[in-house]
Amino acid sequence: MKKVSLFVFVFLMFSCNTNPFTGKQTLALVPNSQILPMAFQQYEEFLNTNKVLKNTTEANMVKNVGQKISKAAERYLTANGYAGYLKDYRWEYNLVEDKQANAWCMPGGKIVVYTGILSITKSEAGLAAVMGHEVAHALANHGQQRMSAGQLQALGAVAGNIAFMDDPQNQAIFNTAYGVGSDVGVMKPFSRGHESEADKIGLTLMAIAGYDPMESVRLWERMSKQGGQAPPEILSTHPSNETRIANIKSWVPEAKAEAKKFEVTNFKK
């Protein structure tokens, strides 16, 4: 068992990446060399099965904001010693006709914005808040971390079932307790942490891109008025709107200070 534990420890130690925005070590059991080709393929399949808007005012705005956000990311990373971090990225920005108030960025810089969110973003700066957040998820390798955490969660379940394989009653108790405990106690807080991290990184990106980070606060205030019953924060993969707004307000000065390092002091609202 000691040898197995040592092997697992060494394996995990060498299966980590460094988050260039926080300096923290993050899980990377699945390498980007596997993730990016899959992401690019899935992105193409998505575009081929959805209505992509081209050369409209709104589509051009999505592309323009996306280019500014990606350029801000490149400037930040280069200035902080990560000049080659985006070498495998293939940036793409598309507006898709869909009533959902949603947007996402796949690993490798493949971005989609749904038309349904534009009534909430209201402006170019509001859109920058959304796109900065989504790009931050990709830059911080949150997808890779979720996949890695999911693998560890599954490994823990297998280990527990093996431990109780001769005791079906306790095995059933373990499965119930482990399922709830690992989800509520580990996976959901893990996801909420990613959301907050993406909010903070996204503020920095939009500020360096020349957009007022306070627009992110206004965006989430509008989001909170959309209605719908949200689950208690402890049972959610996302922070509550109240928590999110309070956090973002506290991070705005830091985002502006980062932008000032790049001689950006005037912000578009």
Image: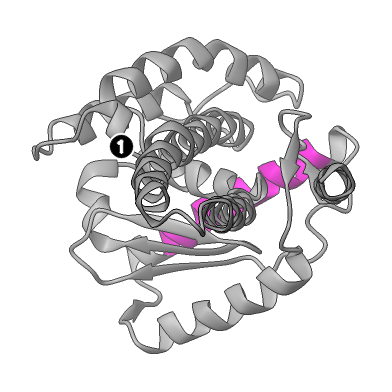
Residue at the image position 55 percent from the left and 31 percent from the top = 197
- Nearer the observer, 33 or 97: 33
Residue at the image position 17 percent from the left and 35 percent from the top = 230
**Residue, disc 1:** 236
- Nearer the observer, 136 or 174: 174
- From this view, report whether residue 116 is shown above or below residue 191: below
> Residue 208 falls in which quadrant of the image?
top right
The answer to whether residue 126 is magenta is no
Local crowd size for mark 1, using a 10 Å CA cut-off: few (<14), some (14–19), many (≥20): some
- Nearer the observer, 135 or 146: 146
Type of the residue with mark 1:
Ser
- From this view, report whether residue 181 is shown above or below residue 164: above
Furthest residue toward front: 166
> Residue 59 falls in which quadrant of the image?
bottom left
For residue 3, side relative to residue 59 (left or right): right
User: Callout 1: helix, strand or loop?
Assistant: loop
Residue 104 position, x and y percent, is 44, 57
Residue 14 position, x and y percent, is 88, 49
Residue at the image position 85 percent from the left and 32 percent from the top = 80
Q: Is residue 259 among what the camera can see?
A: yes
Check the picture and name the quadrant holding the C terminus. top left
Residue 94 position, x and y percent, is 45, 69
Task: From the image, give the main secondary structure of the stretch colored magenta.
Answer: helix
Which residues, given as a range, are shown in magenta? 60-77
Q: Is residue 122 among what the camera can see?
A: no
Residue 22 position, x and y percent, is 72, 28
Q: How many marks?
A: 1
- From this view, report whether residue 174 is shown above or below residue 240: below
